[in-house]
């Protein structure tokens, strides 16, 4: 199966959708019964998005996308564990998505808990441990420690994704997969693309 979407076109549509969302002009495209029926047999999402489980950060709404447009993987702190990585490999290898967006956000509760030294003895221990390198790398930076760590966590995920997955690395090397980091501001509604 060959992906019908080009990475630059997908990213342009995601950012345009976010601008509509910010302005309160979201179109809510492709969300009717006709769309539901048309994609019931198979999916062909244009992008995969790794996002936090936070109820205020629904990628389909933030990017003003419809049913079947995004393959979304959500875990607290937008952590990419083994199962999340397997989900991304599925999206790339079986659904031919040309773009992965790793989306952090302001006032992330999981990052905040890790910054405050949350209880690693709970089931959250793996999440907290995954966030720790970003916290350590940004501890001396001025400004909001949660925002600093959330941005750094996204940058580290983007930079390390190829090393963790031969499937993704192969697509990135062949230039058929683009991985970008982004950061969502809860107050403004803006999604900012993070540079490495």
Image (cartoon, helix red, strand yellow):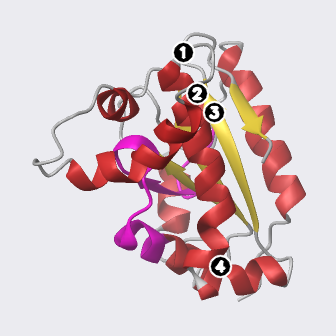
Q: Give the range drawn in magenta.
A: 64-87
Say above or below: 81 vs 54: below
Q: Which of marks 4 and 1 is nearer the N terminus?
A: 1
Q: Which of 172 and 124 is in front in this view?
A: 124
Q: Earlier in the sequence, mark 3 or mark 2?
A: 2
Q: Nearer the viewer, residue 87 or 152?
A: 152
Say what secondary structure mark 2 lies in: helix
Please tell me which residue is depicted at 47% across the width and 71% down the height of the picture.
85
Percent across and percent down for residue 164 are 55, 77
Q: How far apart are marks 3 and 2 (CA)?
A: 11 Å
In this rendering, would 125 be left or right of 35?
Answer: left
Percent across and percent down for residue 4 are 80, 73
Q: Distance between the residues labelled 4 and 1?
A: 33 Å
Which one is closest to the eye, mark 3 or mark 2? 2
Q: Classify 10 Å Cα crowding around label 4: few (below 14), some (14-19), many (20 and above).
A: many
Q: In which quarter of the image is the N terminus?
A: bottom right
Disc number for residue 114: none
Asked if marks 4 and 1 touch (Cβ < 8 Å), the reply is no
Residue at label 1?
A: 144
Which one is closest to the eye, mark 3 or mark 1? 1
Say above or below: 123 vs 148: below
Q: Distance between the residues labelled 2 and 1?
A: 6 Å
Residue at label 4?
A: 168
Residue at label 3?
A: 183
Say what secondary structure mark 1 lies in: loop
């Amino acid at each position: 199966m060959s992906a019908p979407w080009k990475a630059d076109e997908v990213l342009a549509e995601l950012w345009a959708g976010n601008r509509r969302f910010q302005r309160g002009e979201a179109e809510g495209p492709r969300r009717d019964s006709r769309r539901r029926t048309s994609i019931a047999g198979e999916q062909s999402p244009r992008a995969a998005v790794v996002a936090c489980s936070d109820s205020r950060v629904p990628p389909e709404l933030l990017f003003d996308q419809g049913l079947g447009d995004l393959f979304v993987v959500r875990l607290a702190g937008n952590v990419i564990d083994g199962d999340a990585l397997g989900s991304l490999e599925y999206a790339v290898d079986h659904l031919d998505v040309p773009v992965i967006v790793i989306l952090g956000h302001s006032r992330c509760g999981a990052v905040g808990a890790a910054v405050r030294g949350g209880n690693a003895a709970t089931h959250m221990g793996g999440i907290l441990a995954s966030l720790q390198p970003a916290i350590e790398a940004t501890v001396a930076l001025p400004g909001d420690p949660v925002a600093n760590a959330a941005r750094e966590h996204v940058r580290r995920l983007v930079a390390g994704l190829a090393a963790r997955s031969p499937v993704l690395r192969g697509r990135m090397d062949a230039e058929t997969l683009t991985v970008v980091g982004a950061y969502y501001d809860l107050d403004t509604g803006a999604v900012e693309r993070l540079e490495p």
